[in-house]
């Protein structure tokens, strides 16, 4: 498969954010920061895990150096690595170590999204996995203070997970596919392995 360039990856990720995350209200907190332009979406072109870790450290430092009114959250898309969900899942330990290294535990939370995301105890094709399926491997860096404010303003925050599962079950795979929130692929890749 030909590699999608970084600009297209950002466009695809923002389309997914608009149509799925915000459009299906999978995260009731996302719309306000998105419409205010407080979401920073960037791509790591790292070719090895050490460089990816360095990119993540840089984005964490960069996020906390901005005022929340300017940059409330960062979406870091991984271009070349972690295509396998289990490799991605393993890297989440490295991501947690980055928070510890920068003394950001309790300040920043990292949410995980992947094209093949699979919750423990579910089948790979279970529609509920799609609540965390993004076009590309993605790390979402979120300020804990923003989460706390959003949860305080949303009285039933603990119900979000169950509501999302119900939404995806009602939507079904065809409905998800109709959202067109997957990765952009060059036309000539249609016969290649996906």
Image (cartoon, rainbow, N blue to C red):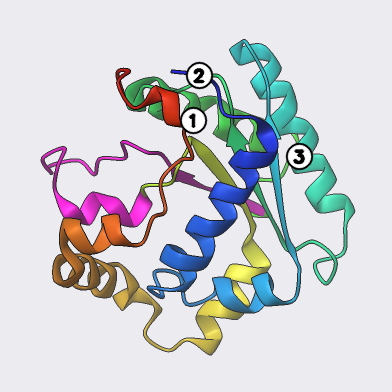
Give x and y (percent) for residue 94.
Answer: 55, 25
In primary-sequence order, the first of circles 2 and 3 is: 2
Of the 4 image quadrants, the one containing the C terminus is: top left
- Of residues 175 and 103, the one drawn nearer to the viewer in this rendering: 175
In the rendered image, residue 174 lying in the magenta stretch gets the answer no
Residue found 54% across the figure and 84% down from its top: 152
The front one of 183 and 146 is 183
Mark 2, residue position: 2
The reply to whether discs 1 and 2 touch (Cβ–Cβ < 8 Å) is yes
Q: CA distance from mark 3 to mark 1?
A: 29 Å
Which label was assigned to residue 186? 1
Q: Which mark is residue 151?
A: none
User: Would residue 121 be counted in the magenta stretch?
Assistant: yes
Element under disc 1: loop
Q: Which of 13/3 is in front?
A: 3
* Residue drawn where x is 64% and y is 30% of the image: 5
Disc with the residue nearer the chain's start (1 vs 2): 2
Magenta region = 108-132
60 relative position to 75: left or right: right
Give the residue at mark 3: 59
Q: Estimate the x, y position of residue 168 in percent, counting from the top left.
A: 22, 65
Element type at marker 3? helix
In the rendered image, the quadrant that contains the N terminus is top left
| Dot 2: element | loop
Q: Nearer the viewer, mark 3 or mark 1?
A: 1
Is residue 97 toward the left or the right of residue 51 in the image? left
User: Residue 139's image quarter?
Assistant: top right
Percent x, y for residue 124?
16, 37
Q: Earlier in the sequence, mark 3 or mark 1?
A: 3
């Amino acid at each position: 498969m030909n590699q999608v360039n970084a600009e297209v990856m950002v466009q695809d990720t923002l389309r997914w954010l608009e149509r799925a995350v915000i459009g299906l209200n999978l995260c009731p907190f996302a719309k306000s920061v998105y419409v205010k332009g407080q979401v920073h979406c960037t791509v790591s072109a790292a070719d090895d895990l050490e460089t990816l870790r360095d990119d993540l450290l840089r984005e964490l430092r960069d996020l906390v150096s901005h005022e929340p009114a300017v940059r409330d959250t960062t979406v870091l898309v991984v271009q070349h690595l972690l295509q396998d969900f289990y490799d991605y899942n393993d890297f989440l330990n490295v991501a947690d170590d980055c928070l510890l290294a920068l003394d950001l535990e309790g300040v920043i939370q990292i949410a995980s999204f992947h094209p093949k995301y699979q919750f423990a105890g579910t089948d790979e094709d279970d529609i509920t996995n799609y609540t965390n399926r993004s076009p590309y491997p993605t790390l979402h860096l979120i300020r804990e203070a923003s989460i706390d404010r959003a949860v305080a303003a949303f009285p039933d925050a603990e119900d979000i997970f169950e509501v999302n599962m119900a939404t995806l079950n009602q939507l079904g795979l065809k409905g998800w596919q109709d959202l067109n929130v997957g990765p952009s692929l060059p036309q000539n890749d249609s016969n290649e392995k996906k």
